[in-house]
Amino acid sequence: MKRFLPRLLLLLAVLAILAAMIAATGWWYAHRPLALAAERVDFTVARGMGMRQAAAAIERAGVGVDARLLALLARLTKRDARIKAGSYEVHAGITPWQLILKLSDGDVTQGELLLVEGWTFRQVRQALESHPDLEADTAGLGEAEILARIGASAQNAEGLFFPDTYLFDKRSGALAVLRRAHEAMQARLDKAWAERDPATPLASPYEALILASIVEKETGRPEDRALVASVFANRLRIGMRLQTDPTVIYGLGPEFDGRLRRAHLDADHPWNTYTRAGLPPTPIAIPGEAALRAALKPEKSDFLYFVARGDGSSEFSRDLAAHNRAVDKYIRNGGGG
């Protein structure tokens, strides 16, 4: 027994030294900066990936890490079951331990997309499909198929998406962003409709969306928006044609060269509000929240005309004679309203 005890102590000492060496090696590995294929490396951890799969994806993306060692470090620190799916980016100087913390804390990076008031669906779609951080899963789809996939009941996509800045996980699909934008527009339209002026000549939320899109395109100065809306509401009440240039331009489509001519105003088509009474069949752009409110709660007025002054503001008139004088004053040398 006396001879066995020193051997046991020696064995324990050796084991302690080995454990210390392993711990030191592990600490050194965990805190050693990793080599990157570039100053910044982006990678995605897909939903359902375990730590081993995630580590392999990180290694393939260009992070100089041994996937097996990274997975082992995560398991030893009990963070392997806490990793979050999403898009990540890492920069020069990151260590394996910092990488594991980033994954387990869900410190994802996000892309950003701005949808602008007054854009058409063609412009919205172009922005989505050309965004470097989005998967263009709308590419090759017809409009009806896109609407079906995002759960929209409308037959036409124009005007259905709320203009705002949308944040998303990188490598998300364009359809997911469109779905959010559609839901946002629907929520704001429902709210504006619930708070509408009881005297509105509009018969449905969709008619409100159509008029709001016209107000959006016709308003140069925010302070004029409610009065612009009142002109159109007054015309609708008395059955007077809206006679608004943006609807004609929309109907001309991509062929419009930027110059509106008398022939354009005379050529009948569904969006020509000079030749047809009432609202056009669809919105002509995506309206913002202020345009929605103005369309459904216009300022009380008896104006039937307005013309752009050339500085972003508008001149409003109650009768044709006054309007013609305003036209003579403001746009005989070019412009319009």
Image (cartoon, helix red, strand yellow):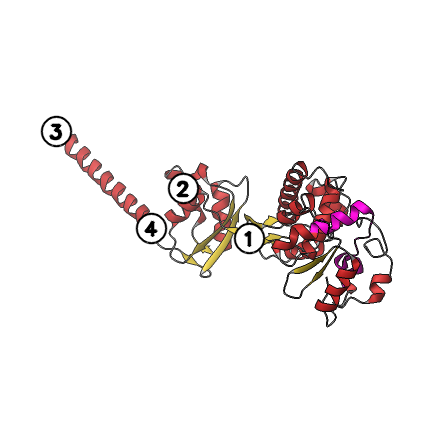
Q: Residue at x 36, y 55 (%)?
A: 33
Residue beneath disc 2: 74
Q: Earlier in the sequence, mark 2 or mark 1?
A: 2
Label 4 residue SS: loop
| CA–CA distance in space, label 2 to label 1 | 31 Å
- 232 inside magenta stretch: yes
Whether residue 20 sits left or right of residue 322 in the image: it is left
Q: Is residue 227 among what the camera can see?
A: yes
Q: Residue at x 85, y 53 (%)?
A: 276
Q: Amino acid at mark 1?
A: Glu
Q: Earlier in the sequence, mark 4 or mark 1?
A: 4
Q: Position of residue 161 (x, y in %)?
A: 66, 47
Q: Amino acid at mark 4?
A: His
Question: Which of pointers 3 and 2 indicates the residue nearer the eye?
Answer: 2
Marks 2 and 1 in Cβ contact (< 8 Å)? no
Q: Amino acid at mark 2?
A: Ala
Q: Earlier in the sequence, mark 2 or mark 4?
A: 4
- Work out whether 42 lies above or below 4: below
Please identify the quadrant where the N terminus is shown: top left
Please identify the quadrant where the C terminus is shown: bottom right
Q: Position of residue 94 (x, y in %)?
A: 39, 54
| CA–CA distance in space, label 3 to label 2 | 43 Å
| CA–CA distance in space, label 2 to label 4 | 13 Å
Question: Which of pointers 2 and 1 indicates the residue nearer the eye?
Answer: 1
Residue beneath disc 1: 112
Question: Which of pointers 4 and 1 indicates the residue nearer the eye?
Answer: 1
- 220 inside magenta stretch: no
